[in-house]
Amino acid sequence: MATVQESSAHWGTFRVEVADDGRTVTAARPHPDEPDAAPAIGNVAAAQHHPSRVRRPAVRRRWLERGPGADPRRGAPDDEYVERDWDEVLDLVAAELSRVREQHGNAAIFGGSYGWGSAGRLHHAQSQLHRFLNAIGGYTASVNDYSRGASLVLLPHLIGRDGMAELRARPTSWQQIAEHTDLFLAFGGLRRSNGWVVPGGHDRHTASDHARRAAASTRIVSLSAQRDDVLPELGAEWVGARPGTDAAVLLAMVHTLVVEGLADDEFLARCTVGADRVRAYVRGELDGEEKTPEWAAALSGVPASTIRALARRAASGRTLVNVTYSLQRHVGGEQAVFAALTLAAFLGQIGLPGGGFSHGYGSMGDYGNGFEPVPLPTLDQGRNPVSDVIPCARISDLLLHPGERIPYDGGSLTLPDIRLVYWAGGNPFHHHQDLRRLERAFARVDTLIVHEFHWTPTARHADIVLPAANPLEREDVAAGPGDARLRVMPRIVPPAGEAREEFWIYDRLARRLGADVAEGRSSRAWLERIYEQWRERVGVAGAPPFAQFWAEGGTPLPRVPYADPAFARFRADPEASPLGTPSGRIELFSRTLDSFALPDVAGHAVWPAAAPADPEHDLELLCTQPSHRLHSQLDMGEASQSTKVAGREAIRLNPEDAVARAVADGDVVRVRSAQGSILAGVVVTDALLKGVAQMHTGAWFDPSAPEIADCVNGNVNVLTRDVGTSTLTQASNGARVRVSVARYDGPLPPIRAYGPPVIAD
């Protein structure tokens, strides 16, 4: 008899329909009462039984025959794999881990779980991998993230680490915006599709509804190179700004406040340090260039009169200044965040309901939901005895340049000599920049081990691939920040082929290495343990015992609205509630940053040095989050494939740019940057500024026809530069890149990214 059960992902909760055989997923659909379902749900059914599923443990033939070591053919499209039984492959993995630990030490292992694997709280890929590696002596780890890596380093210097946490967990809420905000300045827009995504998923999507309610009483201005970077029903005013010029517009708005006497000098004197230095900078007293609206207009394309009018409107009422994560994902990108905080401080509204500074609207679906944070069940990862770390966006540097030192946060880090990379729960051939360079980096290691559901580009570069059970094939619980419900994720179908839970894999490996991660418990027993520990620790009223919780499919979570947004207590009494900065105040000029004497980050917000002219690459390509998948997950699914043009990732072009290149809707173009080339399908739209193109990230990397393009499937990270945002933050630089676009009329190569590799006898 066919069944319907509920499951969850980072893009929401949905119903899964299973055929009479109890194994075949026939459909995945939103709940009937879901107010804003994510299209990515439409990828689930096709992905479940797709030919790209990893069904048996597999070893790359060249590694099996030649042994561990650098190999320039790692990842070659015609590379062969050999399937083996579990015991043999686990013995190989354990032996290789032992060899590396004994000959090079645990710091030679990179625990590379970065990504958004399962939404579950137990089968969380990063927690499982790191728990295992900690149990066998540790590993070199990564810190920060690709989403907001620059902000994670910069903002603690300006508002303290507690202030940073408060800004994430207790920003001025959508309800407060609806009640108090006159003007919402959305630098980087308010993209609907990003509101579908929450770490851990949400029971129902509410971000779009919150935004619509706020727009009924609040004027929203979207400053972006894309007119459709905001929900259309919000009636937002579009101010078209050239990519990467947000800091210039923000500094010019500060200039207007200063010269017209509109700054809140009382707030600046009481709650900040460094305002005088900022005044001197925008007046041109420090570098000889006054940051007037005319100066910013020449850089941004935003008329000077518009910049002045925005500054005056902001000073005349309650104003919220928001910057999306994407604005800090390019060289010098932290300056947009620094300048936005500076503008909000000069307006004097930080800590007021509906006013001040926010950093997450338009980037995450849970941001500003307005409820007090509630801890969730968590698997303890243990302690890592190895102290070596790298910023997560510096993977290629780590593997290519062992022993070198890189500047980071005012100091420096020595890059360890990595011999073994162990990756689970992510796809660096989506997240990372300059994929040809990443290929060269992975070619240097002795061994790459990957756990995967599908033969992703990362799996196809691995020496050993272990098939992992996916979220429909194992039991778990799910919830995201500010969620209404802690939800059961039942096992809906059996694992594909010989796939196993990662808990099972690490337990068997740990036993071979004389360690213990299971502690005598099954995965079901661990699920009950972390639930009961959570129930006891958090004391959620009405949360039932585990057996009842499981039978009922979940339990409600406390949803207590907060009245005081981030920095409210600090604003009320800075002496009694100081920030965790050296001064205890908001540091618009940081003596700490200034003391670092870095070439690209000053003690206050600045306009970054202009990039060298690049006439060969005459378009600015925006690399944005996809609408019909999460990152690169399930790119073979129906929803994701429905967005393709000519069978590959789409590139959007302004009509004038399309005419200049003699291309039209549906044509295939070759897109080039200084780093590489891709094929893409054309969509012509007037939603972009002239000179700006746009593509989604996450198309599966397909290097199978290098004589035509480095990726024939349109993975934009072939094009992006692999350099840090600054010597302070060393964060991801993947949001935009200079490119050229030309019509491609040659034979179209087939897409090979979604099939398994050659499996040899």
Image (tube, grey):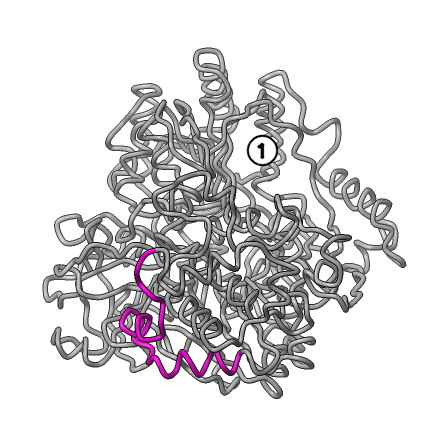
Instruction: Let me know if residue 312 is in the magenta part.
Output: yes
Q: Is residue 169 visible?
A: yes
The residue shown at (59%, 21%) is: 136
Tell me which corner region of the image, top left, top right, bottom left or bottom right, holds residue 647.
Answer: bottom left
- Residue at x 26%, y 43% (from the top left corner): 436
Q: Position of residue 534 (x, y in %)?
A: 80, 46
Residue 72 lies, with reference to residue 213, above or below; the image says above
Question: Residue drawn 16% across and 58% down?
Answer: 614
Splitting the image into 4 quarters, where does residue 758 fall? top left
Check the image and report above or below for 500 versus 145. above
Q: Secondary structure at mark 1?
A: helix
Farthest residue, direction front: 285
The image position of residue 601, as x and y in percent, is 40, 47
The magenta stretch spans which residues?
A: 287-314
Q: How many marks?
A: 1
The quadrant of the rendering that contains the N terminus is bottom right
User: Residue sitting at 64 percent across and 75 percent down?
Assistant: 34
Q: Mark 1, residues whose alpha carbon is within 10 Å: few (<14), some, or many (≥20)?
A: many
Residue 15 in view, yes or no: no
Tag 1 residue? 130
**Which x, y percent locates residue 757?**
32, 42
Residue 91 location, x and y as percent?
50, 20
**Can residue 738 be found in the magenta stretch?**
no
Nearer to the camera, 609 or 174: 609
Is residue 583 found left or right of 293 in the rendered image? Answer: right
- The relative height of residue 441 versus residue 729 in the rendered view (above or below) is above
